[in-house]
Image (cartoon, coloured by chain):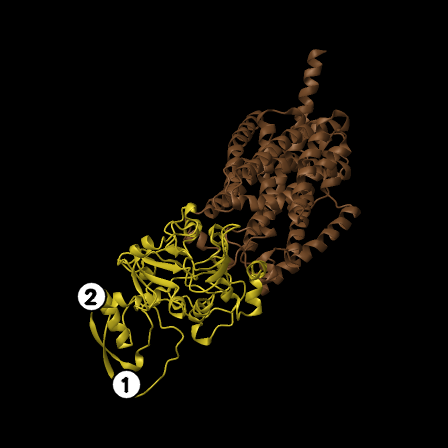
Amino acid sequence: MKNEEKKPKSRRDFLKLGLMVGGGIAGAGMLSSCGKDEAISFNCKKVKVLTPEGKLVEVDECNMKEMDTPVNEKEVREGIAGKKFTMVIDLARCKNARKCVEGCQREHDLPVKDEWLRVYLMKDSKEEGYYWFPKPCFHCDSPPCVNVCPVGATFKRQDGIVLIDNNECIGCKFCMAACPYSSRVFNWKEHDQSEMNKGCFNPEENIQHQVGTVGKCDFCPDMAKQGVLPSCVTACPNGTIFFGDINEDMVTNGVDTFRFRQLLQERAGYRYMEELGTRPSVYYLPPVNRQFPVERGLEGLDKEVSDRYKNERIQITK
Amino acid sequence: METEKTEVGMLREFIPILDRFSRKEVFFMSFLSIFLIWGCVGLIFQVVYGHIVTGMRDNVMWGIFISNFIFFMGLGYSGAVISAVFRLFRVKWAIPLVRMVEIITVISILIGPVYVLLCMGRLDRLQHLITDGRIQSPIYWDFLAINTFIIGSVIFLYVTSIRDFALLRDNSNLLKIGKFRKKLYKILSLNFKNKPAQIKYLKQAINIISTIIIPIAIILSTILSWIFGMTLRPGWHSTIFGPYFVFASIYSGTGLLIILMFIFRKIYKLEKYIEEKHFKYVSIILMILGAFYGYLTFTEYLTGWYGSESWELELIFKFFTPTFYGILFFCSSLFGIIIPIIVAAIPKLRTIRNVTIIGVFVVVSLWIKRYILIIPTLETPLLPIQDTRPEYITYSPTWVELSMVAGGFALFITLFIIISKFMPIISVAEVSEAIDNENLNQSKIL
């Protein structure tokens, strides 16, 4: 998000940055740090840090715990003010390299079989051609999953992101039934997670997967807070996925930056299954003037992955 | 004093049922307990190893548990409607049947919700429904609905049984039962002394509850359908779902009533009270309900097929081609709608045996119908399933799920037998009152 960085930051953002740079945090309203072992040293230095309220305080360095992002439940539920995140996926650039899937799984410490972002091989009608179709969660503006949640575990934020609070989820799976895009994944069993991610939970980071609850693509809000692009965007070698802010009218894949509305208008952007009325935040650019032939996407895949497209594959290679 | 005698005389016929278990019953109960234990083993397995031991996966995230849940809830709602309609319309011939129907209601409404709980990933967080419940969610509507109905149906059964409890209290010396049970009858009869004023108030109470419970049961079975109707899924997202569920419920409940009439008539020798005419009359009700249900099925699929939206069509083709679901759909329509209507429509065919057979057909077909209402829809999401894991593409229940389903049915029968041992399966006070009135009328004519 190059453009964002150039923009003057709000006072609140500045304070947050200060906290991160300071590498420490003190003050009320904060949850404890996640998973990182405390290193005890005896020669404590005094360090000055800013509290979220803007107070400058002095604390012992050895009492400080490092935190990635300050987590506050209210803040997580409300989202980042003034933002409206969006994703534009250029189908002409996708060749099923699957780097986005891997990037997402790495970022969220997901098991290999669980994919929050899936790549489909699609064909709209008999005479049309095949194309690769990466599908994250659409973060709908009228999200059926949020409507049906009986306990408010999944929620819509002001920045457009739909998140799941896995500490709240009762695992009724109604959101999975309600989502028309099959975007939600259930944690059917306990995953072997890396030690670091155990015992802490932050809906924005989404790295701890609790058994019996639902997970899904989260648009990486913890990274957006730091001004970093989601890992699926940065992982893609072809710059297929653009991420940005509708309010800023900018989307970027890390290399190219476009005006969001202009890009949609010039390239005939559309939303998948607009007729359902869910108003997705993910836009697609049709697969015209493609960079790669469809067959390239079938090369060098694991057998497991290439078997997914078995029926379609026969037709393509004909 | 005339009434007193008829009542006591009738109660005497129930004494061998009430105060002992025959050898056959003990044998049958131990046979059922095998299924109960099997169900418990499945339950323990699921609790220990989690949902991974079930056949449910991301696409079919609700399986046989939910279809069983709808089945039992349907029986529950139907029981209340059938009994309340019989009572409100003063259907004289149906008086011996109402108690059975009310017991069906209470037992199914207690077993049904267990299957939803089995579907939930985090049962330890059930209290979130109370602390953080959201009224926007159909699951929350159902949570309120089921709780309302459990209370309502238990009150309904209890209020209609007070007179029998009083009768059992007054004649407890006839029964070979322990002190505790005598005391229990005394408490449950609420000092009911058969005074004219008491009878009047009790009848008023029954009338009021019957009036209230019909709309409640209809609303609640509609709410049950809305869990599915409110989602954007082919086969579920349909305006007809509310009435469809209501009629399917009452239809299956009537089928079960016939089966129970047959069984209890046989094993408890109640031929005097449950006569052939009862089977005939109930079969006519079954025919009317079957026609409604068939009509709704027909319109549901015809509009889907004629409009031929691509998602809807994909599902409909699964039902109307000779696939696994197609065969199930065909059988459930043939044995669940067409054959019962034909058998009930022709007076010659309305024998006790035939009516019982169509009752079995209806109940089994409606169970199958609930299965194909849930699973094929979930196997047909809007985006294609591109997966290699077979359990993600097609659902098949594992032994864990099947054992708990079997356990649920065994529990239903067990509870029915236990209740039939605790109170007469036929409302003794009401039936004897009807007999007395009839005798009185006849003597007046003479």
Circle 1 sits in a helix, a strand or a loop, which is it? loop
The residue nearer to you, when weighing B386 against A109, is B386
Q: Chain of mark 1?
A: A
Mark closer to the chain start, 1 or 2: 2
- Check the rendered structure and report the hue given to chain A: yellow
Q: Is residue A317 left or right of residue A138?
A: right
- Tell me the residue that label 2 is attached to: A8
The residue nearer to you, when weighing B204 against A207, is A207
Q: Who's the residue at 60% across and 61% down the image?
A: B46
Q: Is residue B33 above or below residue B226?
A: below
Q: Is residue A238 left or right of residue B121?
A: left
Snapshot quadrant of residue B85: top right
Snapshot quadrant of residue A50: bottom left
Q: Residues within 10 Å of mark 2 (few under 14, many from 20)?
A: few
Does residue B135 appear anywhere in the picture? no
Which of the image's four quarters has the C terminus of chain B? top right
- Residue at the extreme bottom of the image, as rendered: A43
- Tell me the residue that label 1 is attached to: A44
Name the kind of residue labelled 2 in the image.
Pro
The residue nearer to you, when weighing B71 against B95, is B71
On the image, the x and y values in percent for residue B59 come to 54, 55
- Check the rendered structure and report the hue given to chain B: brown
Q: Is residue B19 above or below residue B123?
A: above
Task: Count all numbered tags in the image, as a single digit.
Answer: 2
Q: Who's the residue at 70% across and 36% down the image?
A: B359
Q: Are marks 1 and 2 in contact (CB under 8 Å)?
A: no
On the image, the x and y values in percent for residue A10 come to 21, 64
Q: Is residue A79 above or below residue B184?
A: below
Circle 2 sits in a helix, a strand or a loop, which is it? loop
Q: Is residue A282 left or right of residue B317?
A: left
Q: Whole-Å distance between the Cαs marked 1 and 2?
A: 36 Å
